[in-house]
Amino acid sequence: MPSSYNLTYTKTDTELLNTLQAPSKGYWIALSILVIGLLIGAYGWGTQIFYGMGMSGKNNPVGWALYITTFVFWVGIAHSGTLISAILFLFRVRWRAPVYRSAEAVTVFALCVAGLFPLIHLGRPWVFYWMLPVPQMGEMFPNFKSPLVWDLFAVFTYLTVSSTFFLLGMMPDVAILRDKFKGLRKKIYGILALGWRGTDQQWRHYTAAYVFLAALATPLVISVHSIVSWDFAMSVVPGWHDTIFAPYFVAGAIHSGLAMVLILLIPMRKWFNLQAYVTDHHLASLAKLMIFTAFVVGFAYAVEFFIAWYGGDIYKGDVFLWRAFGPYWWGFWGLFLFNFMMPMLFWWHNYRTNTFWLLFVSIGVSIGMWLERFVIIVTSLSHEYNPFGWGFHKLTMTEVYIIIGSFSLFFFLFMVFAKVLPVVSNWEVKETMEPPRKGKLT
Amino acid sequence: MSTYKGPHILGIYPTIDELISGIRELKKAKKRSFTVISPVPHHDIEHELHPKPSPVRMFTLLGGLFGFALGWALTYYATESYPLIVGGKPLFSIPPYGIIAYILTILFGALATIAGLFLNARLPDFVIKDAYDERLSSDHFAIQYYGDESELDAVGELLKNTGAIDSQKMVVNVSKKEQFVD
């Protein structure tokens, strides 16, 4: 914590609890816009269920299109939360404390949104339970050799572990809310705090559980998006069948997740006056991490292209030329520009400490990462082995409505969270501060 | 679940230094049946209390092992119950089934960790029946001493002398507050 803000335990409580005061008019307007977006999404999905999958642009040869693109995008967004909350915790990175709660919320809400897309993509969401690991007809289970079943296990486990970590991290903070508020809110927070008192025994078990959950969540950062990448890499589609896919997807996931954390943190710290907690130093640290992930992603792009040439597979080579110079060229060059070139601005101190540029680049990276998944999925399927089977994806408004709905749902959940629960971890921020000492009361 | 464990007294401190001196005085007086309440964990407190490693780690280990075994058992049972060759791979394929076992190791390890925390920390406990003060989650510290009703007044005096500003005495769920300092 920078000393210029002179933060104390009491001041921290007061300022962080201010974020939970009655919302402003602007908040309600923003929330209303998001509700309209949600209704648009619900309309899109409703018409698709009613009239059938023809309402979406999915068709041969592009059978996986925008829904799976958006699914991979949201799973990717989820990753930075665990990186910041679990991995940086294990490495005892001090700047993590004020930003990790928002990052964790990004993880949980992004996974909730991501989880909807396989259901939307199914066409018959009411039979979703066919994916579950229970025997169907004649004692036949789902195929455990299929990456799609691994994916179900991975995403469900990730959602469970990250939600648990998110809620567990909040328990001492919710106890503060229980003790500060009166009336109905006190009762609700009292239930959510589960009777937390902060005894030495509780802290002893709590900190142990926290470390173990962080240690369990850490491999998930690597494995979940690796498994998502195997949905593609295990197939024989040219442009998908690559061993580099797992690290490539993981780096991209963290890259996009960091961008989303910045997109949410920057307006939040302004609206809630949290400059003392989420400082320029924190934002710049996230920007520095983005330079690193941009290089990993850029390296993966280069290696993919190099192997397409060096490997000598004519089909794969052709797909890569088609990506760069075919009708989807804008997607390919767009992703390179947004994901690799734009974060390079953060080499300069002025850019990584300027909230406008941080936000500008982060929005660019989010667009770029969505484009990356679009390019991987749609260009590969539209240009497989047999020229007779080549074709394009035809965008429909139903897909657009559903994607608008997904973004609205994500931001809606985050905005509601920001008004009912502490967006900055109070107890962990206090842990980085000097406690009240004799002659130095707070 | 009740946290009331018999008669006790709670001494509330405004600073960690006075809390530490209170702990030291209690230890010096050979009175060890106390617990410390603080808004955050602090190494100064741990240094005085010398806590043992939490048994939560055993829950994590056992949960993880259970998940690992379940992953292999589930895939083995599924293969045996409907032996169908898929993609030319062996019926029982170790690499793909290992992924299921790996994921379930993490899932059950995490669930068991939470179970371990709840069991050991006596949570959830929706009605706090012990003495408690709302400042303790925020910026104050406390020592909660459990003992015979007869010795609580003497311990209260000791806590006061080490810097406690308030106390709450709880006998059979009846709280009696006393303010040492205005």
Image: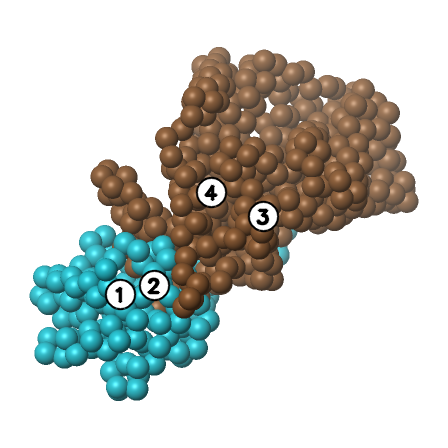
Chain colours: A brown, B cyan
Say which of marks 3 and 1 sits in front.
Answer: 1
Q: On the image, numbered disc 1 is attached to which residue? A: B165
| Structural crowding at the residue carrying mark 1, measured as other residues with C-alpha within 10 Å and reported as few (<14), some (14–19) or many (≥20) | some
- Could you tell me which residue is drawn at 66 percent across and 35 percent down? A355
The quarter in which the N terminus of chain A is drawn is bottom right
Q: Chain of mark 1?
A: B
Q: Earlier in the sequence, mark 2 or mark 1?
A: 2
Q: Are marks 3 and 1 in contact (CB under 8 Å)?
A: no
Q: CA distance from mark 3 to mark 2?
A: 46 Å
Q: Are marks 4 and 1 on the same chain?
A: no
Q: On the image, numbered disc 3 is attached to which residue? A: A224
Q: On the image, numbered disc 4 is attached to which residue? A: A423
Q: Amino acid at mark 2?
A: Pro
From the viewer's perspective, is B62 left or right of A432? left
- Could you tell me which residue is drawn at 72 percent across and 41 percent down? A352
Q: Amino acid at mark 3?
A: Val
| Structural crowding at the residue carrying mark 3, measured as other residues with C-alpha within 10 Å and reported as few (<14), some (14–19) or many (≥20) | many
Q: CA distance from mark 4 to mark 3?
A: 25 Å
Q: Position of residue A422 (x, y in %)?
A: 42, 43
Query: Where residue B14 is drawn, which disc sits there?
Result: 2
Say which of marks 3 and 2 sits in front.
Answer: 2
Q: Amino acid at mark 4?
A: Val
**Residue A419 lies in quadrant:** top left
- Could you tell me which residue is drawn at 41 percent across and 57 percent down? A442
Q: Are marks 4 and 3 in contact (CB under 8 Å)?
A: no
Q: Are marks 4 and 1 in contact (CB under 8 Å)?
A: no
Task: Please indicate, yes or no, whether residue A231 appears anywhere in the rendered image.
Answer: no
